[in-house]
Each structure stands twice: as structure tokens, then as C-alpha cells.
Image: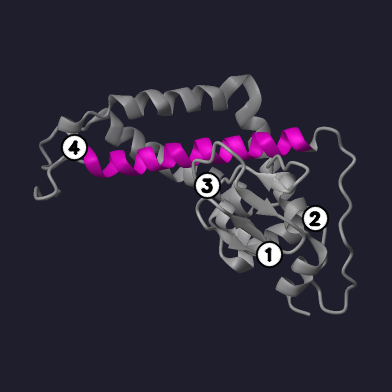
């Protein structure tokens, strides 16, 4: 049995979706995380998911791969780690039981929040590094370009941990970001900075960047 078959036999799509923070109603419907979904349009059952809004569909591995922007193999590894499933040849496949830890749902919600905010900040930094790069060696460095150069590597490192790290590693990152309102501050900071980017600041697509 391959790692993909092992995971699909052990983890229902609906259970995985709930594990990663989605709220699923009695009919197996949830708001789709793959588009701006105000009313539940994502159908989840044991073996597959399908969104009536954006058309996203697939099995549990497809769901996690799309949710966290992973390859199918990385998604299978993450599911194995999160649900305590052995993928070694010859090992019996144990269907995971729902955890009894009362705070697990809150942790998943915090983890998804941290991942979304980090991703938004990363996109902003990537944009700043290109948009505000100096055109000549004599140009004064823009503060946003400097911030992008200083912060990109660290933010990518944190995002990578939340994507493919172990449960313990991800927990440490989430705990650190949730303390003292750091994630709330970063979320507000990104929102404010996005509003500050005015159309006239954007460089012409025909103007070369040196």
C-alpha cells in the first residue's frame, strides 16, 4: 500500500477539514477556503470534497495540498504526522481517533490565522522588494525595500514551518506569534500598508527595473 492509499484509507476528508479549522454543518457543508465563500458551498464526505461555488474537488490529499500549497507527497506526509499514522511498509493502518484535547480546535484556528497573515505579509514583502528597488546605485533606499530585504528570509522560514513542520515545530511558531498580540499587530500592519500603496506609485510595466 502506498503512502497515498494509506492516508486515504485512514483519514476521511471531512475529519481532515475539521482538524484544520473548517466548521462543517450537519449536512457536510462548509464555507470553501479556496474562494471568498460567504455561504457554505463546499461539500465534504468520507472520500471526497466538491465546491459548488469554485469547482474545487478531490480527495483528502488534494484538499490538504491545496489548503497549504503543498505537493501531494508533502500533503500526505503532513496528514501522516498530524494524525499519527505510520507510513512504513508492513505497519497496520490505524484510523485516527478524534483528539480529546479541548484546545485542539482553537490551536487549528490559530494556526490557520498565522498562516494566512504570514502569507499576506510575504506577498507584500515580495511586492515591495520589486516595486521599491533602487533604480541606480545612487538612489536612496526606500524603507519598504529595506524591510523586504531584512524580513523576507525569516518570514519564509516561519511559513515553511507552518507548511511542512512537525506538530511540535508548528506549535512553537503559533505560540510565539499569538503571544502579546503579535499576530493581531501584524495583521493590522499588513492591512494598513496595503491601503498605502497608491496607483501612482506603481511603476509602469514598460519601465525597466535595474
The picture places residue 112, in percent across and down from the top left corner, at 62, 40
Chain-order first, disc 3 or disc 4: 3
Q: CA distance from mark 3 to mark 4?
A: 28 Å
Q: Residue at x 54, y 58 (%)?
A: 56
Q: Are marks 3 and 4 in contact (CB under 8 Å)?
A: no
Circle 4 residue: 202
SS at mark 4 in the image: loop
Residue 190 point in image, percent of width and height: 42, 29
Report if the CB atoms under discs 2 and 4 are less than 8 Å apart: no
Quadrant position of residue 111: top right
Tell me how far mark 3 sits from mark 2, CA to CA: 24 Å
Q: Quadrant of residue 174?
A: top right
What colour scheme governs how the chains and residues are painted in the rendered image of this protein? Answer: one colour
Q: Residue at x 58, y 46 (%)?
A: 32
Q: CA distance from mark 2 to mark 4?
A: 46 Å
- Spatial separation of the CA atoms under disc 1 and disc 2: 11 Å
Q: Which is more toward the observer, 12 or 135?
A: 12
Residue topped by disc 3 = 157
Residue bearing mark 2: 83
Q: Residue at image x 88%, y 61%?
A: 95
Which residue is the site of mark 1? 76
- The vertical placement of 178 against 46, above or below, is above
Image side of residue 6 versus residue 59, left or right: right
Amino acid at each position: 500500500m502506498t503512502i497515498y492509499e494509506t492516508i486515504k484509507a485512514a483519514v476521511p476528508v471531512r475529519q481532515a477539514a475539521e482538524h484544520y479549522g473548517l466548521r462543517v454543518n450537519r449536512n457536510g457543508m462548509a464555507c470553501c477556503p479556496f474562494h471568498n465563500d460567504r455561504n457554505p458551498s463546499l461539500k465534504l464526505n468520507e472520500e471526497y470534497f466538491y465546491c459548488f461555488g469554485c469547482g474545487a474537488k478531490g480527495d483528502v490529499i488534494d484538499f490538504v495540498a491545496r489548503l497549504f500549497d503543498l505537493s501531494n507527497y508533502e500533503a500526505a506526509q503532513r496528514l501522516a504526522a498530524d494524525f499519527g499514522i505510520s507510513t512504513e511498509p508492513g505497519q497496520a493502518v490505524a484510523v485516527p481517533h478524534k483528539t480529546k484535547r479541548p484546545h485542539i480546535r482553537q490551536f487549528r484556528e490559530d494556526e490557520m490565522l498565522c498562516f494566512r497573515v504570514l502569507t499576506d505579509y510575504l506577498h507584500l514583502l515580495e511586492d515591495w522588494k520589486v516595486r521599491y528597488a533602487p533604480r541606480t546605485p545612487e538612489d536612496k533606499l526606500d524603507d519598504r525595500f529595506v524591510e523586504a530585504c531584512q524580513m523576507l528570509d525569516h518570514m519564509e522560514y516561519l511559513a515553511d514551518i507552518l507548511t511542512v513542520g512537525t506538530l511540535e515545530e508548528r506549535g512553537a511558531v503559533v505560540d510565539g506569534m499569538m503571544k502579546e498580540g503579535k499576530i493581531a499587530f501584524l495583521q493590522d500592519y499588513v492591512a494598513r500598508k496595503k491601503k498605502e500603496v497608491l496607483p501612482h506609485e506603481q511603476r509602469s510595466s514598460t519601465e525597466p527595473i535595474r
